[in-house]
Image (tube, grey):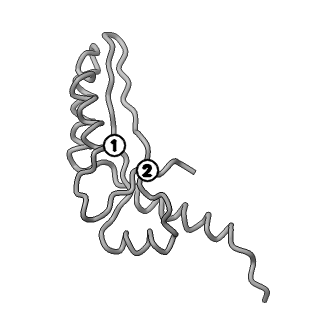
Amino acid sequence: MTRIVGADGLSLQDVEEEVLAGARFVVFSTCVSMILVTQRRAGDVHFVRADDPFPKAGLRAMGLTLLLGWWGIPWGPFHTVGALATNLKGGLDVTRQVMAQLTQAAQAASPAQPA
């Protein structure tokens, strides 16, 4: 399973309650360019609670992209704008996929019930 930042110590029930209250799982994009090479990549999955509208990880990804994304020819500006747009929207929401994985892992870990 993918690393989830910010959900340490929470049970599946805790996570489900937080998601119902507005929390979500998001991925932030970064873009780094070095003249002829441009790399845009997604970072770790972050658990963002409802009362944290824009986490520090999003700010870090945007700062890195603003500093290092533009310098690639020809794709640097294109991927930089794309990464910034994704991050300004609060990141890519992957809540459904993560909840499905967490539920599946919890079901696999629980002992089978006798019939």
Q: Position of residue 19 (x, y in %)?
A: 37, 69
Q: Amino acid at mark 1?
A: Phe
Q: Is residue 13 left or right of residue 106?
A: left
Give the distance between the C-alpha atoms of the residues marked 1 and 2, in whole angstroms.
12 Å
Placement of 74 over or under 90, stated as above or below? above
Q: Is residue 31 left or right of residue 94?
A: left
| Pointer 2 residue | 5
Count of number-bearing discs: 2
Asked whether the residues under the numbered discs 1 and 2 touch, taking CB atoms below 8 Å apart as contact, a structural biologist would say: no
Q: Nearer the viewer, residue 27 or 78?
A: 27
Placement of 82 over or under 89, stated as above or below? above
| Pointer 1 residue | 28
Q: Amino acid at mark 2?
A: Val
Q: Residue at x 62, y 63 (%)?
A: 105
Q: Earlier in the sequence, mark 1 or mark 2?
A: 2
Q: Secondary structure at mark 1?
A: strand
Residue that protrudes farthest toward the top in the picture: 35
Q: Which label lies toward us, 1 or 2?
A: 2
Mark 2: few/some/many CA within 10 Å (<14, 14-19, 20+): some
Q: Quadrant of the C terminus?
A: bottom right
Q: Residue at x 45, y 58 (%)?
A: 7
**Disc assigned to residue 115:** none
Mark 1: few/some/many CA within 10 Å (<14, 14-19, 20+): many
Residue that protrudes farthest toward the right in the picture: 114
Q: Is residue 47 left or right of residue 67?
A: right
Quadrant in which residue 101 is drawn: bottom right
Q: Residue at x 33, y 49 (%)?
A: 92
Q: Secondary structure at mark 2?
A: strand
Q: Position of residue 108 (x, y in %)?
A: 68, 67
